[in-house]
Image (spheres, coloured by chain):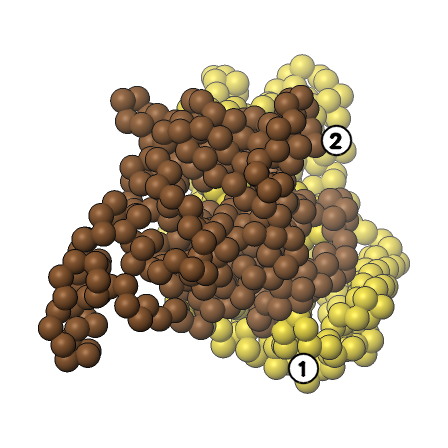
Chain colours: A yellow, B brown
Amino acid sequence: MTEPAAVTGPELSRGGPLDPAPRSTGARDRRRAVSDRLRGGDLGLLPVLAGLVVIWVVMQILNPIFLSSANLTNLALESVPVGIIALGVVCVLLVGQIDLSVGSISGLGAAVLAVLFVDRGLPAWLAVVVPLALAGLIGWFYAQVHNRIGVPSFVITLGGLLGFLGVQLWILGPKGSINLPFDSGLVAFAQLQFLPPWLAYALVVAGAAVLYATGAARAAERRRAGLTAPSRRLLAGRSLALLAGLGAAVWYLNRDRGVGWMFVFFLALVLALHYVLSRTSFGKSMYAVGGNMEAARRAGVNVKAVLTTAFVLCATLACVGGVLSASRLAAANQSSGGGDVNLNAIAAAVIGGTSLFGGRGTAFAALLGVLVIQSISSGLTLLNLDSAYRFMVTGGVLLLAVSLDAVARRSRVSHGRA
Amino acid sequence: MSADSLPSPPEGPEGSLLSLRGISKSFGAVAALTDVDLDVAAGQVVALVGDNGAGKSTLVKVLSGVHRPDAGTVGFGAGTVSVSSPATAQRLGIATVFQDLALCENLNVVENLFLGRELRGLRLDEVGMEVRSRALLGELSAKIPSVRVPVAALSGGQRQTVAIARTLLGDPKVIILDEPTAALGVAQTAEVLNLIERLRERGLGVIMVSHNMADVRAVADTVAVLRLGRNNGVFDAATTTASELVAAITGATDNVVSRRAGRDRATDDGTEPAHGTGAAHKGEAS
């Protein structure tokens, strides 16, 4: 989680390609590289982490319940549906497009799930798979309209926002609301199932071990090839920090109900997307399409296929978010996916550091961005302030995040890091 | 080489790698190219010069597969080929670096070099790609601060180097550079010219489109002049003066360039400006 943005790569080796590369970079080199990058305006995830700390401190001062185990357990679970939608939004933003209809698609997914599962009595897995496939089809349709006719994605998905809201209302029919049975696996997954403490700790240890093992293997490979590599101590320090941080978080959450399975599922999706974006050629082509579409085309990247995949991923993840949201609420109704879901998901991606102009951002943006948004929402709810204030504060934070991005971009340009 | 090769073996003169014969191309009523010939041998730098609208860009696009010629043949290696698409050109080994370079500024040097041809797509071989990038840039004596900085952090000359290095990964035989020194500073221009010499040492045929007579005469072996879509002479770069080239480009020995050069020289020497061609010829320094 501490890894910097994939775009700039993990290390900045000084010296030309012909200079013999230093065999390893110690903590001091690493610190200098990081401070260089920060001064250059390459802020990565730092602003959102700082913002999160500030929000948590302020909210805790205003209401001492905020940082209680019970509230944080809830906060983690509540973040998941919008967080997963934001994960999809990161995908479309990365390729320089936008999807304004994620809220409507999530609502439609919830409605289809409820109708199939409750009214038609289909098995749960089928009632989940059908809306997911439907959402994938919607994403594919967006991409076709964009690729073949050339309509900007802003307009296509604005149409989708209205159109699929209509479909959602039509599917729900006159009664407008369908309750999911409490004893179903879906509701249990979203509300009641938590990791047993031993498993949560085991996962934390396994995560830290995997981080160290992969880091050490890569460093050894780089050293064999005569390239710069982080020192073993640095890697161990990173893993221990992760171990301590996540271990403390799990311990704290375990004082209440613990870590929800749904949150683990979200984390797994974030890590999977992170791997795809940073370690596969498909991920690189997504950054390339967002950075310079014409260059990507000439380099032999199948631009249309990349765009199609991004739209399909976004719509599908939006539907996953909708299904989980309905499961958590144990109901699908006319306001599922409505209200602020749409804009919260997009705001989460942007607050997390995803550029609206494409080619910049990471999977962790969705995770951290949604934690910021849900923290504001949860904190203000605890203060008994209604959604009027929540909207205003969230709007202010969004504006702040985008302004910070704009300032950082100017600094990047002046330091030649654009 | 590929399925596009046809059984027609006549090679160009003196073992040309690439030889164009009678290439014509028109867009509607406008004849952009008429009966153009061009030869490039391995290890030879051919400068393609001409005024605006002379057909340089059209010729480059014909060679890179963007346009198909209306008439004429493209001889490549032992046979004639039809360059029907950019992909075909790349498969044949004709690489083009367009003026806009087509680099992704948000990606680093390694990522740009290997974009679209990454090693091990599902688990990127980052070490392998970085090693090959450093080796390639080292062979080109490129001055790049680090292969892990985003391309946005590089100067114009460094970007040109990265763009050229990227085409070399495809192992081309002929490389076409479209205005490689336009918009570059003095030092960066020199870097790029060094790089072109290194391409020649590697045995590549280089076609360099340029407006800059000094650059052309600095690196080119031969200079092919296009004028109004036709050949207007092929000159030996070592023995031809800039004013002769300008004369071929503009189609007149008495032109605005030579008059200007004559006037400047006359003022420098403190002598009367001479009329016509005489003044422009003398003492042309490289």
Position of residue A132 measured from the top left corner of the image (x, y, whole percent): 64, 28
Residue name at image x 56 percent, y 52 percent: B44
Q: Eyeballing the image, is A147 above or below B114?
A: above
Going by the image, does A413 lie left or right of A46? left
Q: Which residue is mark 1?
A: A29
Instruction: Answer yes or no: is residue A376 visible.
Output: no
- The residue at the far top in this view is A120
Badge 1 amino acid: Asp
Going by the image, does A198 lie left or right of A341? right
User: In which chain is the residue bearing label 1?
Assistant: A
| Closer to the camera in the image, A286 or A337 | A286
Q: Which residue is mark 2?
A: A184
Q: Which mark is residue A61?
A: none
User: In which chain is the residue bearing label 2?
Assistant: A
* SS type, badge 1: helix
Residue name at image x 45 percent, y 35 percent: B37
* SS type, badge 2: loop
Q: Nearer the viewer, mark 1 or mark 2?
A: 1
